[in-house]
Amino acid sequence: MNLRLIAYTGKGGVGKSVLSSATALRCAEEGLDTLVMSSDPAHTLSDAFGQPIGSHETKIMEHLWGVHIDPVDEAMRNYSTLMDYIVEIFRVKEIDETIAYELANLPGSTGAAALLKAEYYDSKERYDVLVMDMVPSGEALRLLYLPYLLGRFSRKLVKLIAPAADLGRILQPVTGMPMPSKKVIDKQLELLEQMEAVRRLLTDFDKTSVRLVMNPDTFSIMNAKRTYMQSSIYGINTDLAIVNKIMPDEVKDPYLTELKISQRENTEDAEKDFKPLPVKRLPLYSQELKGFERLRKAASDLFGDDDPAKVYFKGKPIEIITGEKELELILAARLASKEDVEVERIGDELIMHIQLDSGKAEVLIPLPAITFKYKLKGAKLINGSLHIKFGE
Ligand SMILES: Nc1ncnc2c1ncn2[C@@H]1O[C@H](COP(=O)(O)OP(=O)(O)OP(=O)(O)O)[C@@H](O)[C@H]1O
Ligand SMILES: [Mg+2]
C-alpha cells in the first residue's frame, strides 16, 4: 500500500486542525483508509469530531481513525540523546553554524515524534492516507528541516561513530570528538536509519505534500510564504495553499467594509505571489467548524468534486546552489516578465522590485537562514528564473 501523507501547516489558529479533520473525513468517505494525526496537545481532533480521540489510534467511523501523539514517546528519548550528541559535535568541530543553530532550536518532542510515527505508519502499510495536523509553522518548519539535516549528516555521523566506541576513543585525541557509549551509539544508529526513512518519505513528491493554511491577513500569508520557501529548500513539496476564513460577500455590515476590502486584496496578492501553486479560498462560516456535518461542508467547499488526496501540484519554488564562499538562490520568478528587476535586502527578507507593464510591483521573499551570514551581491533574471547571488 502506498501511503499518501498530507501535512497541514500554518500560523496559530488559522484552521489547520479543522481542515486536517475535514480532509481526513472526506478521504474516508471516499473509501480510503485514513488516519488523522495531531501533535497538538490541546486535543483539537476530539473537539472537531465531537468524540474522544486518544494517544492510540482511535476509530472514528468506517475508514477513519484519529490519534493524538503522546509527547512522552519512547522514540523521543532516543531522539533527545541523539540531538545532544549532534549539537556537541557541532560545538567541538565548529562546523556549519547555521545548521547547528537550527538544530539547537529544535522544537519540543511532540512534533518530531509525529514524524517518526508517520514513517512508522508508512512502513506498516496500514493506511492509504495519513493527514497530519502540524504544530504552528515556526515549530513545524524546524521539524521539516530535521530529516534533511540528518540526511546530510547521518552518513558522515554513522561513519564517525559506527566503528565501535573503542576506535573512537583512540581517535578522540586526534579528532577532538566527544565519544558516546556503545549503547548510545547503537540507539543512535537505529534512529538515524529511521530518520533517513523519514527523509525519504517526506521528500517523495508522489507521496508527501505540505498544505499551507493561512487567513486573509498579511501576517499569516507571510508566514505561509516562509514555510513555502523553506520546505522547498529542504526538498519537500507543497501542493496547495488555502486562504481560510474569508468574510463572505453577503456580510453587509458597514463596520466590516474595510476589513472585507483588505481581505480581498490580501487574498488576490497571495494568489499572485504563490502562483503557479494553486490557492483555494474558504469562507468564514457563521459557526465554528465542529462535527461531521460542518466538516463535510467545508471539505466539499474546498475540494468540490476533486479527490482530496490527489497531489495538486508539484514544484520547486526555490533552489540553492552552495559554493565555497558564496551562495546562489534560484527562484521561479513569478510576476517577473521583464529584465528589469531590483532586489534589496532588509533583515531576513528580500524585496524584489519588478517593473511590470502595469507599473512597479514589489514581492517580499523570506530568506532562508543559510543566507544570513552572506551579503547580497546582486540578482538577475535568466530564462524566467531569478538568480540571486550572495557572498562574503
Ligand atoms: N472557515 C472557518 N469558519 C469558521 N470557523 C472556522 C473556520 N476555520 C476554522 N474555524 C474555527 O477557528 C478555530 C481555530 O481552528 P483550528 O483549531 O483548526 O486552528 P489551528 O490552526 O489548528 O489552531 P492551533 O494553531 O491553535 O492548533 C476553531 O474554533 C475552528 O472551528
Ligand atoms: Mg490545531
Image: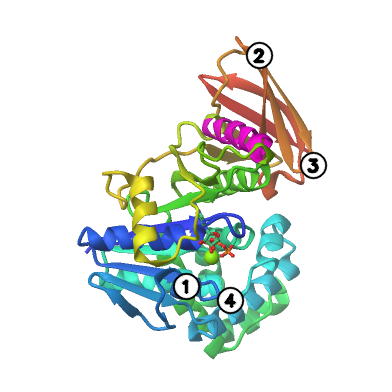
Asked whether the residues under the numbered discs 2 and 4 touch, taking CB atoms below 8 Å apart as contact, a structural biologist would say: no
Q: Is residue 192 visible?
A: no
Total residue callouts: 4
Residue that carries the numbered disc 4 in the rendered image? 109
Which badge, 3 or 4, comes first in the chain's sequence?
Answer: 4
Q: Nearer the viewer, mark 1 or mark 2?
A: 1
Give the spatial CA distance, label 3 vs label 2: 23 Å
Asked whether the residues under the numbered discs 1 and 4 touch, taking CB atoms below 8 Å apart as contact, a structural biologist would say: no
Which badge, 1 or 3, comes first in the chain's sequence?
Answer: 1
Type of amino acid at the residue the image marks with label 3: Gly
Q: Say the numbered circle drawn on residue 347.
A: 3
Q: Is residue 31 visible?
A: yes
203 vs 47, nearest the viewer: 47
Type of amino acid at the residue the image marks with label 2: Asp
Indicate if the residue with disc 1 has its beta carbon within 8 Å of ligand 1: yes
Give the spatial CA distance, label 1 vs label 2: 51 Å
Which badge, 2 or 4, comes first in the chain's sequence?
Answer: 4
Residue that carries the numbered disc 2 in the rendered image? 340
Q: Is residue 58 above or below residue 366?
A: below
Question: Is residue 93 on the magenta stretch?
Answer: no
Point out residue 336 in the picture as x, y percentages from the top left corner. 57, 20
Q: Nearer the viewer, mark 1 or mark 4?
A: 1
Residue 263 found in image quarter: top right
39 vs 165, nearest the viewer: 39
Is residue 114 left or right of 4 when viewed as pictured?
right
Q: Nearer the viewer, mark 1 or mark 3?
A: 1
Type of amino acid at the residue the image marks with label 1: Asp
Give the spatial CA distance, label 1 vs label 3: 40 Å
Q: What is the span of residues highlighted in magenta in the rendered image?
A: 256-271
